Each structure stands twice: as C-alpha cells, then as structure tokens.
Amino acid sequence: MRTFRRCRPRFASILLTQAPGSGWNEALRQQGVAVLAGAVPPVEREAILNDIWDWLEGVGSGGAVSRSDPTTWTMSDRRWPRDNMSTGIVCVRGAGQAAGAWRVRGHAAVQSAFAHFWGVEPSQLLTSMDGLILWRPWQQKPAGIAEPWKTRGSWLHADQNVYRRPDLEAIQGLLSLTAADPRKTGGFVCVPGSHLPEAQQELCDLLGGPPRLRKRGDFLALPEGSSLGAGARGASLEPGDLLLWDARLLHGSEPAPGVEHEGEPEDPVVSAPELLRVAVPVCMVPRSFAQDQDELAAWRRKAVSEGITTKHWPHKQRVQGEAGGPDYVVPKLSSDMLRVL
C-alpha cells in the first residue's frame, strides 16, 4: 500500500494504491492522482538506473562524474548537469533522450497504464521526452563542498492553463527508481482534488482571473500562502512505483525537513553512495490529439537526433532546456520505444 501524506505540519494517509484493472483510473479521475505499485520489477528497474548513471558518467558530465565518488557530483564546476531552478529536474545535455529515460517509455507496464486510462492501444500513444529527476544526497554531502545540494520546495503549480483549457488534456507521470518518504527523503507533493472545477476557479481567481490568464502559458504557480496549498500531500513510494496525475492538478516537490549536512573531513567515506531521489517523468496521450501528425512526427524525430528534451505535452512542439552537445550520441530505440515516438 502506498500513501500520500500531509506536507507540513502533520502526516495523514488519504489515498490507497490500486493495481491496473482494479479501479485506479477512477481514483485518478476523482482525486487527480494515483499510484501503480511495483509497475517495474527490480531487475528492470536496476537496468534503468544503470543506464542513467552511464549517461551521467558520459555525455551528462563529459566524463567528469563517477557514480562511486560523490565528491564529483558538483554542479558549480559544471560536472553535474544543471537543473531547473534548483528542483533537481535535469533537462540539459540531452537528458530527455538518455537511454534510461527511453527504457521507461518503452516499458510494457508504463505504456499499458496510459493506454488503459485513455482507452486506446499502446501503438496509438505518443510519449513525452522529459528530462530526469536527480536529487543528490544533501543529508550526506561530502566535506568541503560549498554548493547547496538540497532542492527547493514550495513550488506547487498546475501544468495546464485551466482558464483557457479547463478539460482533461494530459495525464503526467513519473517512475520512481528510489524509495520516497516525505519525512526522510521528500519527493512528489500534490493537492488531491485540485483538478476539479471548484479548485480550478479558486486558482484562476488567485491569479487575476480572465484578464491575466487568457495571456498566460500553461505553467500556473500557486501563490505562497494560499489556502489551496494547505491540502498538499507528499507521496510515499517504493522503487518501481508508477505515479500518475492530472496535468491540472496542483503539484510539485518538497525535500524532507532538515538542515543540509556537510560532512567533516574525518568522516568515513560512504562505500556505496546513492542518489537521494531518482525518477523518470513520462506523459503519454493518444496520437489523435496532435493537429498535424506528419509535421509533429518530423519534429519529434529531429528531437531524438539532436538530443532535445521536451515538455510534457507529447502532441505539441514544446522544447524544455537545451539540445545535446557535440558529444551527444543518438539513442538506439527498440520497436517498443519507436511505437510511442
């Protein structure tokens, strides 16, 4: 059983995990969020994680990062890839085309979940080509590293402009490759039910109503101190869990409580250092959502060939971050991966 827990100041279970075929899609429609426990088994999960480390040690860092040496996990010297606004979301150096990300998109359980929700065959889906979520272990930061590793919190937002387009248009998701606990690691947070009309109207009012929202893009940040944020919950996840949510849902991430720790020089070296949080975002929608499928297909092939990371709208031409650099290597896509390209 996976739970969602209240983020600050107390914790309360509000949502049960359900397996595919047993009503999780209804929970997703009602709450705006659901967890499919154990979607990806351990052996395949480890293969994905290994692919991500291969990317980090290769084109992701120009060979400057070592998975066995956390003193090399530094961003200030450009070894560790830059993230978006200290959130741990990496969209540079071709992250969206990393082999590990594509392994998630091509996984049968991931495709089946989205196909089940939309009522289509997997071959009728388009996948996003999002980046990677990589949190360094800020509670165990090596001695002598001055840069902050702890990610920012309190950035609840919706990824769909609910004034301009109030109806369901996308289901977002992420495959968690590490365990997540709101009190120990932090991770995904959301406001269950905030995709529903009453909450949408409240969000629109907070952001200035029609005069402002008709000109806004899809990213709608919830103002600090809003009563809507009081209902935020943090997700407890196990490695291999697939988390799905409505794009209209208020969501974000929050690190666990605590002060960032810098080790002392005499502290023993961790024999097997691990990242605090690793997850692969993924969104799939029916191919029929695209207005011009031929034009979109050509653009998506170009994204793969040039190492472009996209936003979570598979049926739109939306770039997130920069293209791959001169050492970018085009991924080899299997038939299962090509099916959703």
Image (cartoon, grey):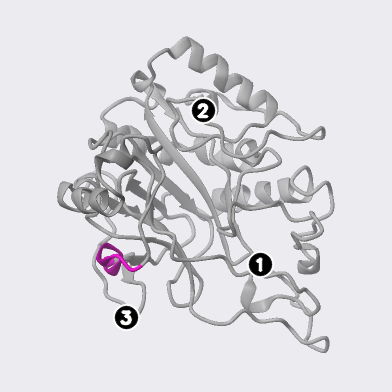
Q: Quadrant of the N terminus?
A: bottom left
| Mark 2 Cα-neighbour bin, 10 Å: few <14, some 14–19, many ≥20 | some
- Do callouts 3 and 2 mark residues in contact (Cβ within 8 Å)? no
Indicate the amino acid at tag 1: Glu
**Residue underneath mark 1:** 274
| Above or below 258: residue 300 | above
Q: What kind of secondary structure does the magenta stretch mostly adopt?
A: helix
Residue 310 picture quarter:
top right
- The residue tagged with tag 1: helix, strand or loop? loop
- The residue tagged with tag 2: helix, strand or loop? helix
Q: Is residue 288 magenta?
A: no
Q: Is residue 227 magenta?
A: yes
**Residue underneath mark 3:** 10
| Mark 1 Cα-neighbour bin, 10 Å: few <14, some 14–19, many ≥20 | some
- Do callouts 1 and 2 mark residues in contact (Cβ within 8 Å)? no
Q: Could you tell which of marks 1 and 2 lies nearer the N-terminus?
A: 1
- The residue positioned 68% from the left and 33% from the top of the image is 323
Indicate the amino acid at tag 3: Arg
- The residue positioned 69% from the left and 26% from the top of the image is 306
Q: CA–CA distance between discs 3 and 1?
A: 28 Å
| Above or below 311: residue 65 | below
Q: Could you tell which of marks 3 and 2 lies nearer the N-terminus?
A: 3
Q: Which residues are magenta?
A: 225-231
Q: CA–CA distance between discs 3 and 2?
A: 43 Å
Q: CA–CA distance between discs 1 and 2?
A: 30 Å
Residue 272: % across, % down: 72, 71
